[in-house]
Amino acid sequence: MGNGEKLKEECGVFGAFSLSSLVAFNIYYGLQALQHRGQESAGIAVYDGEKVNCIKGLGLATEVFNKGNLKVLEGKMGIGHVRYSTTGSNDIVNAQPLVANFRKEYMALAHNGNLINAEELRNQLEDEGRIFQTTSDSEIILHLIAKNFQKGLIEAIQETMRQIKGSYALVILTDHKLIGVRDVNSIRPLCIGKKGDTYFLASESCAFDVIGAKLIRDVEAGEIVAIDKNGINSFRLEVEEKKMPCVFEYIYFARPDSVIDGKSVYFTRLEMGKRLAIESPIEADLVVPVPDSGVAAARGYSLQSGIPMGEGLIKNKYIGRTFIAPDQKDRETGVKIKLNVLKELVKSKKIVLIDDSIVRGTTMKRLVNLLKSGGAKEVHVRISSPPVKYSCYFGIDTPTKKELIGARMSVEEIRKAIGADSLHFLSIEGLKKNIGLESICTGCFDGNYPLEVSKGKSKYLFEKK
Ligand code: SF4
């Protein structure tokens, strides 16, 4: 898809605690499995029995790490992070894990999510004389834990959780423990895995599969899990948690082979496609997915409708991050470099084109055009989520409201703008029913957020304009 055509993933976190084995390679493989959640930087911190060693850099996990530097990270407990910057710019100083040393203890922290009261908290901490090394909101969490540390580690984390607002899935490494924390609304995912005597924490369960670990369970809303040589201990915050996990994890962010809060991401997408076919049936010859984001929903649409599915759009798999975006006037070429139409398949056919979301609408317009110029008789667009109308404040990089086509136009206006013969978005009711979770965040579709937000904040909160 074109630049900016998809909402951007946030970050991925991973942690490992072993009684017998070194963990750096497992963390590296885990980060590779979570690479779709952030490609700007990668880092690993490992406790070697005396101190925390940390290596981090800009780029993919494969670009930052090699056999040589992974061997240096010797230790049986550690954490890792892949980053896409939702607050703080893409600068090495903001790469995670963040490592601190206080009261003769080491602490490393990796965060997935976004704090909505970061500005207030940072101002308070700076007024107290605390100095920050990064412009990311994650460092605030580290400062608050340090500030309350004399109460004991778990109580310090609980006190921090009472003060921070927003989304956070955290992995924390201390001299003795690996800790996982999930915010009281469980907005971002975090789960626990095990292999032999090694426990793992990860944003998504697909990271366990790659290292042969088994998913045990998800970390619950408002839960702290502390893993040490005696096993796992669970602590709860004594507040009423209101589960509202991010629906977009199921729609697009998470890998299809992950299971989040007990739901298979792939089958959830398949069901979205089936429901889409029930909500908006159409007589057509072929269901065509937008690769790769529309594949599972297109399969569902095809199964439900009985219309065969075919690869009318072929993706160049070797473009990836190296793609150089063409000038505005030559954007058409840009789409063709990434995706080409299989003319022999689509010629003279009525096509149902399926994708999981429309953000700006520019790429969808080009894809409809591509199919039509390839000889398709009609192109009916079906989207397996509602129109994105609102910005996200919980760790997803959404364009401003005026750039969101769903915020500016009615469905009929969007249909005309993208040149489709018909257009339908999955309803919010259909989406919720399909996912089957009692309560879920649908803020970017209906403005109904888990927490009250003050709108219009910049993602680079702590940098000079
Ligand atoms: S606003 Fe949208 S992207 Fe953000 S957490 Fe809610 S559902 Fe997810």
Image (spheres, rainbow, N blue to C red):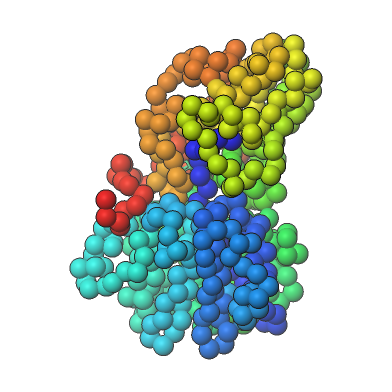
Q: Quadrant of residue 435?
A: top right
Apparent side of residue 360 relative to residue 231 in the rendered image (left or right) = left
Q: In the figure, is residue 171 to the left or right of 165? A: right
Residue 225 in the image: x percent, y percent? Answer: 54, 69
The answer to which image quadrant residue 437 occupies is top right
Going 49% across and 33% down the picture, which residue do you hit? 327
Q: Residue furthest left?
A: 127
Tell me if residue 363 comes above or below residue 237 in the rendering: above
* Residue 203: x %, y % from top left: 58, 57
Quarter containing the N terminus: top right
Give the image quarter of residue 269.
top right
| Total number of numbered discs in the rendering | 0
Residue 4 on image: x %, y %: 49, 38
Residue at the (78%, 21%) spot, across then down: 345
Comparing 326 with 245, the one in front is 326
In front here: 183 or 252?
Answer: 252
Is residue 117 positioned above or below 110 on the image? above
Above-or-below relation of 377 to 216: above
Task: Tell me, yes or no, if residue 326 can be seen here.
Answer: yes
Q: Is residue 431 visible?
A: no
* Residue at the spot 45% in from the left edge and 74% down from the top edge: 99
Residue that appears at 70% across and 49% down: 257
Across and down, in percent, residue 265 comes to: 65, 44
